Amino acid sequence: MTLGWRVAYEGKTPPPGSVVRPDERLSWPRTVGLGAQHVVAMFGATFVFPLVMGLNPQLAIMMSGIATICFLLIVKNKVPSYLGTSASFVGGVAAIRAQGGDDQHVTGAILISGGVLLVVGVLIHYLGAQIIHAVLPPVVTGAVVLLIGFNLAPVVANVYWPQDQWIALITMLVAIGIMVGVRGFLGRIAIFVALVFGYALSWIVDRIFGRITSYDASASHDTKHWRVNFDALKAAKWIGFPNKTSGVGAHQIAGWHFPEFKWAFILLVLPAVIALVAENTGHVKAVAEMTGDDLDPYMGRAIAADGFGTVVASTFGGSPTTTYAENIGVMAATRVYSTAAYYVAALVAILFGLSPKFGALVAATPGGVLGGITVVLYGMIGLLGVKIWTENRVDFGNPLNLVPIAAGVIIGIGNTSLKFTDNFSLSGIALGTIVTIVCYHAARLIAPPHLKAPALAGAGGADGPTEASGPPSGVKPRE
């Protein structure tokens, strides 16, 4: 592997229909511009998800840049990708906090999950990608992604939406309108645009109507407060590292910290590993289709690299990482797949992470705005599970697919608990995932041949894909 890139098309814009390959680059000014475009593409979701998980967005941006550089080195610059904050952990983190866990417990659980993903990637590298299809067929993967998203509905209803219902409603409508009605790059960053709009609207409403009396997440009860509070922004420095986490319990101020580990909390976020395997598999397949390269030999490396990035980020209190569909969109639009642009994007993100002023600005995002954003995002995560089913033609007329998946999904979404001792229980996403996987494979063992034949990969119908037909769809929560 080398960090040198061949200059393509004399460094100028490639002709129509031509591509710039991962080991090539344009002129450095053009490469810097493309790198900045990648930063804008991943920017919104990368700091929205740390906010909704209660982690420090300044630190998350910084660590995303570091994780991206690690990823590119591990995949030997063969798979262009940016590692932004993963949405798949949001449900597990919400469950941890609902059970009294703090920032240290959250990042401890995330770190272990990253380590598991790293091990899974190494196994896939040596055993082959077919192991993914055998253990996690599309019917199972879709169910896990679905329950991760829909399990979050109470978080929207009970935490964010009550903070400012009208701002939440307007922000939601703006996000939907941009996603559906605006084409091109602006449509791909609709969540970011809606967040900026809601932020500005909240500030204007404060000037017109004054303070609002509503639920205050920081105080855990109704208070009279400004929608947008810039006190922390005014006090923050322009340049510096993120502050260390301070306070305890629900009143913690997120910053850098070292993780703590508790098995009951670790089990709550482990199901996210399944979603990340699907996401990274889909990302590698998408890049392979666009570049024409055979990237299957790098599938395991990519998954392991994402796990390594998550371990590195969470070691210091950062958020979990994943590959980003937004950046796939930028590559598809520009036909420039140069990894040089991703190194530039990573360095820009690290520079943003060195500004406490930036972190304070992001942290001041009004709760009502997050309410409008999350009602769309969480629903999209859940429905992407349905998309995995439809793309792989999963047949729910087959009881082998229908019955075990139905049980797991209801347990996960309903946050059902199974108590083992006074100090240990399984519930929600963790229990739903275990029931889905175990019951599905157990059902396959006892099912008659005529039920298993058309569902070799968890997909149904005589024309449905088999285990050899390819990986489960890796569609991503932010497409």
Image (cartoon, rainbow, N blue to C red):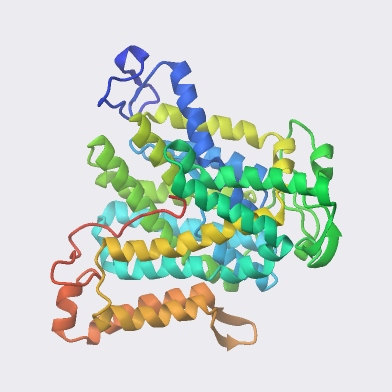
Viewer can see residue 89 = no
| Residue 172 vs residue 306, the one in the foreground | 172
| Residue 178 vs residue 392, the one in the foreground | 178
Quadrant of image for the N terminus: top left
Could you say where residue 325 lies in the image, as x and y percent from the top left?
Answer: 42, 46
Could you say where residue 140 lies in the image, as x and y percent from the top left?
Answer: 34, 70
- Seen at 73% across and 62% down, the residue is 163
Viewer can see residue 186 = yes
- Seen at 29% across and 47% down, the residue is 285
Could you say where residue 312 lies in the image, as x and y percent from the top left?
Answer: 55, 47
Above or below residue 81? Residue 136 is below
Could you say where residue 404 lies in the image, as x and y percent from the top left?
Answer: 35, 82
| Residue 298 vs residue 153, the one in the foreground | 153
Above or below residue 47? Residue 168 is below
Above or below residue 436? Residue 297 is above
- Seen at 51% across and 49% down, the residue is 177
Q: Quadrant of residue 398?
A: bottom left
**Labels in figure, total:** 0
Above or below residue 62? Residue 259 is below
- Seen at 22% across and 37% down, the residue is 292
Q: Quadrant of residue 156?
A: bottom right
